[in-house]
Amino acid sequence: MNYSNLFRIAIRALIRNKLRAFLTMLGIIIGVASVIAMLAIGEGSKVNITNEMSSMGTNMVMVMPNMQRRGGVSLGASSSMALKYSDVEAIRNEAASVAAVSPEVRANGQVIYSNENTQTTIYGVSEEYLTIRKLEIQSGRIFNTSELKSMAKVCILGQTVVENLFGEDADPVGLTIRVKNLPFLIIGVLKDKGESGMGQDQDDLILAPYTTVQRRLAAIDYINGIYASAISEDKSALAISEVEEILRRTHKLKETDENDFRVMSQSELIETVSSITDILTILLGAIAGISLLVGGIGIMNIMFVSVTERTREIGLRMSIGGRGNDILKQFLVESILLSILGGALGVVFGYLIAKGAGSLMDIPPVIKVQTVVLAFTVCFAIGVFFGWYPARKAANLNPIDALRYE
């Protein structure tokens, strides 16, 4: 019997029991839809995060203090005082692959204007920080070298701080706010950047000269981090190497000493985030794949029922010359058809679920062709695996016993 006849017989059998066929496929539909939706949302999140991080500059290099330890106990990076402004100067003067470098000093506090107030983070930086972090001034200006040296109480506000203190579309340049009870003159407002791919509000910040934040707000003599940008993305690895070499020398570390700082590039962060989202996506996909296993068991169950119901038909075919191999193919094709049809409906429902969930989470889902191909391949494999045993049982029936079956 050729395969076109086998398909016709299988389709007729499915049409005769439409409701039962649909209920049998339901497990496969739910399984495939879950896998497609999970992978689409996972891939969409990954693309979203990497795009957001890339928008901050793939040639960015970050230096953070390493974990400080005392008596074998980690005190955390925040308690480390390994980085000084002299490190920034050394990198600026000696690292040939670094185009711009800025210190970063952070302080959290309440910001007040009139009877409005908000909690935010004040970043103490130099002028080059805006270039490195791809920040743009919407109105006003950046602080100058004179204001940096004199620890001037001037600042630039992010859009969230502007909205919280002055309302939407306000331009507060020239007004004075109080940060930790110190008056700060607003000299500029940053352009809106929105949320990062990791859900962080990139506009909830205030920029001020690092000298001002370091001495007047945080009262510290070290810096919390160093941000730099390599001349080009290709030079990022070289810039990291140069920065590490310079800091090991300025920190007087011996060859056997571990670094008391960490140097990372934006590309490394993107790769790390990508690998984490890949693992999460695979994990979620695997959990959803359990539904496929349940769906496969449902197909095996219904195929056993089908073999039992059609025992006399099988016996009749065998008595007029039908071969066991043809009987096996007939039931196997029916099982594969059930699984493939369930997979096709699952892909459609998975796409709709991913679109709906993506709209709610503001994450455009990404469905790869490979994912769809994988889904159909798995469905085919499920059809063969779970249909083989019932089909084999039908093929091995004794024609006499089958004809006598009531």
Image (cartoon, rainbow, N blue to C red):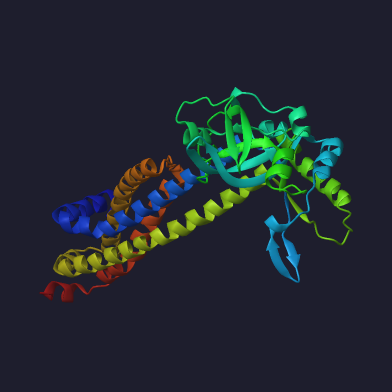
- Occupied quadrant, residue 151: top right
Nearest the viewer among 188 and 217 is: 217
Q: Is residue 135 visible?
A: no
Nearest the viewer among 16 and 140 is: 140
At a point 87% along the width and 49% down the height, the residue shown is 250
Give the side of residue 102 with respect to residue 275, left or right: right
At a point 72% along the width and 34% down the height, the residue shown is 126
Nearest the viewer among 196 and 292 is: 196
Coordinates of residue 112 in the picture (x, y in percent): 54, 39
Coordinates of residue 303 in the picture (x, y in percent): 24, 65
Nearest the viewer among 352 and 154 is: 154
Task: Look at the picture and state if 25 lies above or below 230.
Answer: below
Coordinates of residue 105 in the picture (x, y in percent): 70, 44
At a point 60% along the width and 40% down the height, the residue shown is 179
Q: Residue furthest left?
A: 406
Number of marks in picture: 0
Q: Is residue 345 visible?
A: yes
Give the side of residue 152 with respect to residue 136, left or right: right
Task: Look at the picture and state if 179 lies above or below 319.
Answer: above
- Quadrant into which the C terminus falls: bottom left
Give the side of residue 249 with respect to residue 282, left or right: right
- Quadrant into which the N terminus falls: bottom left
At a point 26% along the width and 57% down the height, the residue shown is 26
- Occupied quadrant, residue 231: top right
Coordinates of residue 395 in the picture (x, y in percent): 27, 68
